[in-house]
Image: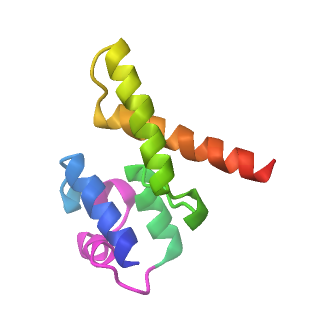
Amino acid sequence: MQELGTAVRVERRRRQLSQAAVAAATGVSREWLSRLENGAPRLEADKVLQVLDFLGVAVVRPEEHPTRADIAKAQKVAWSMELEAQPLTEEGFQKVLRKVVQHRLTRSTA
C-alpha cells in the first residue's frame, strides 16, 4: 500500500492537483485520500480503484515491471529515435519502455 500511495501522490502532484480536488472528483474525503497517499493498510477497494482510475495510475503484475534489460533496450531505441527526429520526451521514452515490456511479455507467453 505504501508504494501505491506514493504513486497516487506523485501523479496527483505531477498533474498539479490538490488533495481536495482529487477527493471531490472521485467522491472520497480529503482525509481518506491522505490516508491512501500515506499507505494506510485498510481502505475500501472500490474507492482506491476510483482514485487510481481518475489519476490514470495502473497496477501491474511484478513480471510486467521493466527489467534492466528492458530499460537498456528502450534507451537504445530512444537514442536512435533522437538521431532521426526531435529529442524524445520522458513521456515518449515511457511509451517505448512499455512497448519493450509488452513485447517481452508477448514473446514469453507465445
In the picture shown, does residue 84 fall above or below 51? above
Residue 15 left/right relative to 82: left
- At x 43%, y 45%, the residue is 72
Q: Nearer the viewer, residue 34 or 57?
A: 57
Which residue range is magenta in the image? 22-43
Residue 53, percent from left and from top: 46, 53
Q: Residue at x 56, y 66 (%)?
A: 62
Q: Is residue 99 above or below residue 69?
A: above
In the displayed structure, 93 sits above or below 66; it is: above
Identify which residue, 14 or 98, lies in the foreground: 98
Is residue 41 on the magenta stretch? yes
Q: Position of residue 76 (x, y in %)?
A: 42, 34
Q: How is the image coloured?
A: rainbow
**Residue 95 at x, y percent in the picture:** 45, 36
Q: Residue at x 24, y 76 (%)?
A: 31
Please say whether residue 25 is one of the residues in the magenta stretch: yes
Q: Residue furthest top?
A: 84
| Residue 38 as seen in the image, left or right of residue 68 | left
Quarter of the image for residue 106 reads: top right
Residue drawn at the location 39% of the way across and 69% of the way down: 4
User: Which quarter of the rendered picture does the N terminus lie within?
Assistant: bottom left
- 44 lies left or right of 26: right
Q: How far from the left and from the top, in percent, is residue 39?
A: 33, 79
Q: In this orientation, which residue lies closer to the viewer: 26 or 4?
A: 4
